[in-house]
Image (cartoon, grey):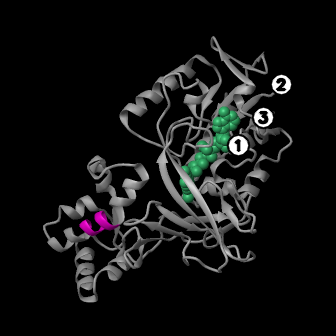
Amino acid sequence: MFDTIIVGAGVAGAVAARKLAEEGNRSVLVIERRSHIGGNCYDCPDEYGVLIHEYGPHIFHTDEESVREYLSRFTEWYDFGHEVVANVGDKLIPVPFNLNTLHMVYEKEKADRLEKKLLEEYGEGSRVPIMKLRENADPDIREIAEYVYQNIFLRYTMKQWGQKPEEISPEVTGRVPVVISYDNRYFKDKYQGVPKNGFTPMFEKMLRHKNIEVRLNTDCRELLCFQDGKIYFQDEEFTGDLIYTGAIDELFDCRFGRLPYRSLDFRFEHLDTDSYQGHSVVNYTVSEDFTRITEFKFLTGQTDADGTTIVKEYPFAYTGAKGEIPYYAILEDENQALYEKYRSLTEDYQGFYLLGRLAEYKYYNIDAMALKAMELADRLMKK
Ligand SMILES: Cc1cc2nc3c(=O)[nH]c(=O)nc-3n(C[C@H](O)[C@H](O)[C@H](O)COP(=O)(O)OP(=O)(O)OC[C@H]3O[C@@H](n4cnc5c(N)ncnc54)[C@H](O)[C@@H]3O)c2cc1C
């Protein structure tokens, strides 16, 4: 019998498994439904030898020293400042909108004047939500807010969330920032990059431990059963800790209905050219049905493959049909209430822990997820 069972071999499951196996000397079983580890961070070479991220581009970024340090035990890093551009008309402009963008969008004299006003009003280095720019008495400054809303935010958000303009909450709109600096980086974090040899080798090393067994291609519902406050593993009562990182509604047969998610259709293309777009990520904020194109070579730094592979992302509403993957929880009150109904079902079971983006119906970045898993493992080891 295992001391601990973990469902899911993504960031949440893998980090928790390693800590409990190594520091807690527990025997840990990791059950994973897919044919590979790494969850949505999984990467692999495609048939042309280009390293791709199968579930969309993933960049590790963090200010959290403990997470960087922990993951660095399992990988070296290819560090870079991640930059994103938006395709607007005939230009590729840096996003979030910053002073470089300002100078690309407006002619020199006007851009200089606007820059001076922004610096005087808000100060170098600040991130000003467009809601604040809109409240400014100066029509020039309000014009910048309008530009960002129309050309960077509106259509992208409509595609991503399947919303009409009037359905987009003004609170969300208002939070879109304008950055008063020449820094083109998308994230502010101290550490930014990807594991030098890819995410999957990092997870392989993490899960390679004498106290860890990983079972791939196995849905946990084949092995686990929940009944009258007791958990059964292969028909025997299980009294150890169970960490579940899968979708909570599925675990209870969606008895109250499915939790809504946005999903993504990833369409990969290989091209016989060195470079397709010259950037890792180009957002399509005013045209096209897809939201963005990622060109992997520019993300991973790979130089030893011929040609280039890109992926286009088409968002759609998740229905639960076979093959669909729930990606983004839709954080609205009624969905949160539905989640709470499912969560309360777990209270009957001792030693049962929900962890991860699906089990908690929440968006986590990789670093936040790793930190949460580290904290849970620490807590369980103190029990
Ligand atoms: C398109 C996209 C891009 C992203 N980009 C970034 C980024 O650039 N930087 C960043 O920090 N974060 C990014 N994220 C977030 C990142 O993907 C998550 O932080 C991370 O995947 C969460 O890990 P997890 O372990 O909770 O979930 P997952 O990675 O989804 O892992 C859960 C695992 O559980 C398994 N599972 C589920 N149900 C069962 C079952 N019944 N039985 C057995 N196994 C089961 C699944 O197969 C899966 O492998 C992105 C997310 C998306 C959607």
In the picture as drawn, the residue positioned furthest to the bottom comes out as: 109
- Residue 6: image x %, image y %? 71, 34
Q: Which residues are magenta?
A: 145-151
In the picture as drawn, the residue positioned furthest to the left comes out as: 137
- Whether 148 is among the magenta residues is yes
In the picture as drawn, the residue positioned furthest to the top comes out as: 228
Q: In this picture, is 305 found above or below 286? A: below
Which residue is disc 3 drawn over? 28
Which residue is disc 2 drawn over? 1
Q: In this picture, is 191 found above or below 102? A: above
Most common secondary structure along the magenta stretch: helix
Quadrant holding the N terminus: top right
Please, what is the three-letter code of the amino acid marked with disc 2?
Met
Q: Quadrant of residue 159?
A: bottom left
SS at badge 1: loop
Mark 1 C-beta to ligand 1 under 8 Å = yes
Q: Which mark is residue 9?
A: 1
Given residues 39 and 130, the one toward you in this image is 39
**Gap in Å between the C-alphas at discs 3 and 1?**
12 Å
- Residue 22: image x %, image y %? 78, 42
Question: Of the residues tagged 2 and 1, which is closer to the observer?
Answer: 1
Q: Quadrant of residue 239?
A: top right
- Residue displayed at 40% across by 67% down: 96
Please, what is the three-letter code of the amino acid marked with disc 3?
Val
Q: In this picture, is 215 found above or below 306? A: above
Residue 353 visible in the picture: yes
Label 3: how many Cα within 10 Å (few below 14, some 14–19, many 20+): many
**Gap in Å between the C-alphas at discs 2 and 1?**
20 Å
SS at badge 2: loop
- Image-based side of 97 in relation to 40, left or right: left
